[in-house]
Image (tube, rainbow, N blue to C red):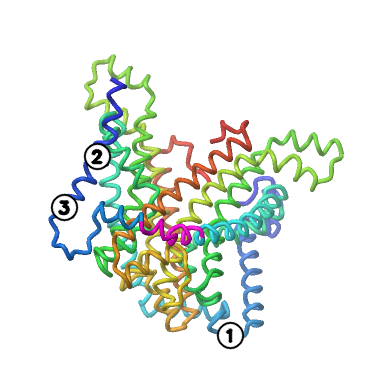
Amino acid sequence: MSTLRWPRYFILPVGLIVLWQLWGMTLPARSRAPVPLDVLASAVDLIASGRLPMALLQSLGRVGLGFLVAGSIALVLGLLMGFFRPVERNLDPIIESFRPVAPIALLPLAILWLGTGTPAAVFIVAYAAFFPMIVNTIAGVKGVERRLVQAAQTLGVPQLTILRTVVLPAALPSIFIGVRLAMGLAWMSIIAAELAVGSKGGGGGSGGVGEMMFVFYAYYIELDSIVVCMIAVGLVALAIDHGLRWLQRWLMPWAEQYR
Amino acid sequence: MAQAADSGAPPVRQWRQSTVFLYLRSLLALAIVWGLVALWVGNHVILPQPTSVAYELFRLIVSGEMLVHAAVSLWRLALSYALAALIGIPLGLLMGLWPWASDLLDPVVEILRPISGIAWIPLALFIFGIGNELPIFIITYVALFPFLLNTMAGVRTTDRTLIRAARTMGVDQRTIIRHVMIPSALPQILTGARIAGGAAWMSLVAAELIGAPSGLGFAIEWYRQLLMTPKVIAVIVVISLLGYLTDRLLRWLQRRLTPWSTGIGAAG
């Protein structure tokens, strides 16, 4: 039975693509609708000309930068908030009030403050990545076994050293869950930010794969290329998630049970 | 929630320990800092005073303008959310119950899932144009996957012993699905509903910002173009409040429908 299962996996995807191609062939020749073979051709073109890789790199660079900013703030604040009760009691209301603000809703403000270039996009990414990071860091720190901390305190270790050498490593698996959630959100918001900057910025190319898609929509009406970009966006999302999973296993082989 | 340890303390002390007090105090500090920064910036368009945002918020609500924007957005959200549930839950049941269905459908789901709803916006703009259909399509797409995947996982993790027990007592397959498997999958389906709710809000704003002639997402962009920053911030506040309330509602529903479930406070 199980040896015969694998062909089933291909039935629907292959069938749908074939149907799509057949449907495309019935359309008049001047139709702009994307068709699989044309999508393939424009994928080859976009990759060979280096435009797609460059746009992806630019978007990834922004995600990396925004993530770095958000991650370092969230890590420090999260450790302090999880470890010191008064810090948490005073900062938690502020964090909780900003958490429901959808990152994309801030885009008009970001454009107003930072213009339509990279800083606005980085701001949105950082905002999106911040909350999963800090929530999971706090949860991780609170989940650290109290006896470990107490043992270190009994030995007279200073508080900040405890934070660095006991709490941080023990909270790492939970922090990493935050990293994975944050990266997924960050990649999603960069596309949204670049798209919206492209559509609302009134020209002034800001680059990135999101803006590229908007340009294909608005100026060239090359739907095949849009589909190529969509597939590329999906593949990068997959690659980010798998890369982080792999990193997690490599960094924390003991943390398998937390996943 | 006053702390139990302080229940014997005088009322003023108790009040000062309460969550509400701490919340108000932190937010007041934030508003003061905001006000000072706004004074320093000195430009009403770039950063207005918190008081003028509050005033504009009040005016938008009283004039009914906010209600119109919010009603349009909430109507779109409700419609697409219901659509996603209507498609996602049955498909998830199908895929969880019959291996052949999941063998067939799973590859398609796994191919589409990494492509975020937002990445669909340019293509959807071309297909649907600017209007109601675009946000409805995007939100349905985004909310579909949490419903589907959580239903599937919930059905699959039904305790085998329960199924065997029912079978031993001669219960037929249909009844087992209805009275054993679906109830046992319900907590996870509701978790999916909450994840779908959060994702739906986020993409609602994005979809309306780019491709709708009305709604809250459109309103922020509209007021930005008019350089009415206090109104922009007022709309952002309303979006966040509504997003928060939807999440509360879904949590309440989860507690109400599945009081036995413990996995309510998942982080994220």
Chain hosting mark 1: B
Question: In the displayed structure, would residue B198 be above or below residue B39?
Answer: above
The amino acid marked with disc number 1 is Asn
Q: Residue at x 45, y 53 (%)?
A: B248
Mark 2 vs mark 3, foreground winner is 3
Which element carries disc 3, helix, strand or loop? helix
Residue A12 is tagged as: 2
Q: Using the rendered view, name the quadrant where residue A122 is placed.
A: bottom right
Q: Which residue matches tag 3?
A: A23
| Relative image position of residue A73 (x, y in whole percent) | 65, 57
Rendered image quadrant of residue B75: bottom left
What chain does badge 2 belong to?
A
Q: Nearer the viewer, residue B227 or B122?
A: B122
Q: Which residues are magenta?
A: A45-57
Q: Is residue A197 left or right of residue B26?
A: left
- What residue appears at the point 24 percent right and 16 percent down from the top-left corner? B170
Q: Are marks 2 and 1 on the same chain?
A: no
CA separation in Å, label 1 and label 3:
56 Å
State the separation of the CA atoms marked 2 and 1. Answer: 58 Å
- Element type at mark 1: loop
Quadrant of the drawing holding the N terminus of chain A:
top left
Q: Position of residue A231 (x, y in %)?
A: 37, 52
Task: Answer with left or right where residue B19 lies relative to residue B210.
Answer: right
B172 sits left or right of B197 in the view: left
Question: Is most of the magenta stretch helix, strand or loop?
Answer: helix
Report x, y in % for residue B103.
29, 32
Q: Position of residue A9 (x, y in %)?
A: 29, 34
Tag 1 residue = B43
Q: Amino acid at mark 3?
A: Trp
Q: Is residue B71 above or below residue A52?
A: below
